[in-house]
Image (cartoon, grey):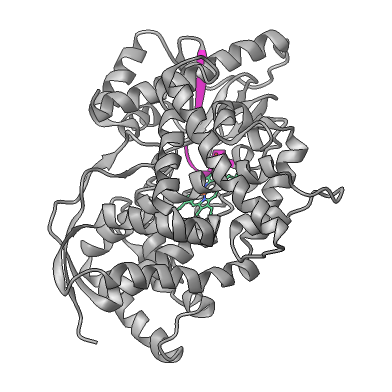
Amino acid sequence: MDQTNSALWFSIALLFIISVITMIGRHRTAVNPTCNRPPPPVVSGCSLIGILHTFLAKGMRAMIHDHYTQLGSVFTINFFGLKVTFLIGPEVLGHFYQGLESDISLGDVLKFAVPMFGKEVLYGVDIATRNEQTRFYVDALKPSKLRSHVGPMLHEVEDYFSKWKQQGTVDLKGELAKLLMLISSRCLIGREVREKMAKEFYTLFCQLSDNGLCLTSILFPYAPTLANYRRDKARAKLSAILIKIVRSRKSSNQVEQDMLQNLIDSKYSDNRSTTEAEVIGLILNLIFAGTHTSSAASAWTGVCLLRNERFMRAIRDEQKQIIQKYKGHINYDALMEMETLQRCIKEALRMHPPTAANFRKVHKNFVVQTKEGDEYEIPRGHIIASPIEFNSNIPHIYKDPDIYDPDRFGPGREEDKVGGKYSYTAFSGGRHACVGEAYAYMQIKIIWSHLLRNFDLKLVSPYPKTDRSKLALEPKGKIMVRYKRLAA
Ligand code: HEM
């Protein structure tokens, strides 16, 4: 199956599951008869063939563009009974990102992930417990804790690139993926895995996510299929590795400075400690959420920079000043001052967000008002979608959106703020905003600060297309880069 087809099947599978959940939901709840505003315009019937054709031939962005220009910023696509309402632009996204989980839920859409991470965590537990578990993440990733990861991240980055020769050609995407896997092993899971079994752990982790996300597993997460068997086997092996580490740390009173330790030490508001199963589910989910997204983000940042000499020079100048100020020693404060680099990463993520769209299920009708003043009532039972990739490229928010221009976030322009609160959603926003954003920026900055200070780099392959066959949208194919070490 080629990549476009697998992306299509993945989308159809996701819609199918959501459809089934929606049907079940419909049986449980009576339809609200009091609709004061009209529902959004609907695309259905024969138009669906056109939608599928555009999606296959030109991608999701083109498909949404056609309907956005014809129908405006709120429209519904009726996929054989499943109604997906697209919300385009920050003006109509307030409730999507701020609404209560009981009104619009993310959990319903992600039920298929329960066998991957366990029924003890996140989408396997009630909302109150899930909120507490999200608090554990937030606490573990707050600035005071993040400071302790700078040293280990720097160590991994320096060690990795010290193995590059004086000059050569590499597939930068592959290199960055390997490096981020090592950083995750060290900073999220800890020393024990990093030093003895990083490769084995990640092989198992890939088996867990590849099988957990394949078509049949998404459609029938509990059916006796080969993919589900492989997923569960990989999960059991990962759990065995992690349980051993957790027990060993507890029995020897060993305390480490990694995310696993933070989760072991976390407590619920009734003072109950996390169980082993909870710690394991939470750490696996964190690796899942953080590693592929960061890997795609670092690769896109590289491609954008290597094609834009002006910004690469601006970053090198900034690096010189910061290195001088901090006397050659990069710490958390130095990273915080790398504003040009931060904007360059942010702009790469605007143009190429690793997450294409966010979805929620509507449990309670709500009204949206478009920027033209039209009001629509979105009924319960609909799936609502915030297509991040499309929303990050709207011309009335971002001037010349197809041009890589990190200065659009700089003083005096701040296009992401002027356009409204939800103009920039690469890291989502509101209730489900990515808890790992600061951590992600830290590791990508450390990588690119090191590369640009130590190497002359040239992109020798063409600007890549987007690979839509994976969960995180990444550059398609290899990114071949010629490097040469700079004189010390
Ligand atoms: C450039 C890298 C990253 C991007 C673009 C990204 C993007 C996102 C997005 C869009 C969501 C929200 C999904 C939704 O609203 O439906 C999310 C959630 C999440 N992210 Fe990230 N992420 C990145 C890195 C990370 C890292 C490094 C970690 C952890 C170390 C992480 C942990 C999480 C977690 C735990 C959630 C779930 C939050 C919740 O459901 O409340 N992410 N991320």
The quadrant of the image that shows the N terminus is top left
Q: Position of residue 30 (x, y in %)?
A: 73, 10
Considering depth in this image, is 290 or 284 the residue closer to the camera?
A: 284
Q: Residue at x 21, y 44 (%)?
A: 477
Relative vertical location of residue 50 with respect to residue 198 in this rendering, above or below: above
Relative vertical location of residue 252 with respect to residue 27 in this rendering, above or below: below
Displayed quadrant of residue 26: top right
Q: Position of residue 468 (x, y in %)?
A: 32, 35
Q: Position of residue 240 (x, y in %)?
A: 57, 41
Considering depth in this image, is 68 or 391 the residue closer to the camera?
A: 391
Considering depth in this image, is 156 or 233 the residue closer to the camera?
A: 233
Give yes or no for residue 83 being in the magenta stretch.
Answer: yes
The quadrant of the image that shows the C terminus is bottom left
Q: Residue at x 63, y 31 (%)?
A: 107
Can residue 326 be seen from the camera position used here? Answer: yes
Can residue 41 be seen from the camera position used here? Answer: no
Give yes or no for residue 140 being in the magenta stretch.
Answer: no
Considering depth in this image, is 473 or 413 the residue closer to the camera?
A: 473
Q: Residue at x 29, y 58 (%)?
A: 404
Classify residue 376 as left or right of residue 133.
Answer: left
Magenta residues span 82-93
Relative vertical location of residue 132 with respect to residue 331 in this rendering, above or below: above
Displayed quadrant of residue 155: bottom left
Q: How many marks?
A: 0
Q: Position of residue 57 (x, y in %)?
A: 23, 26
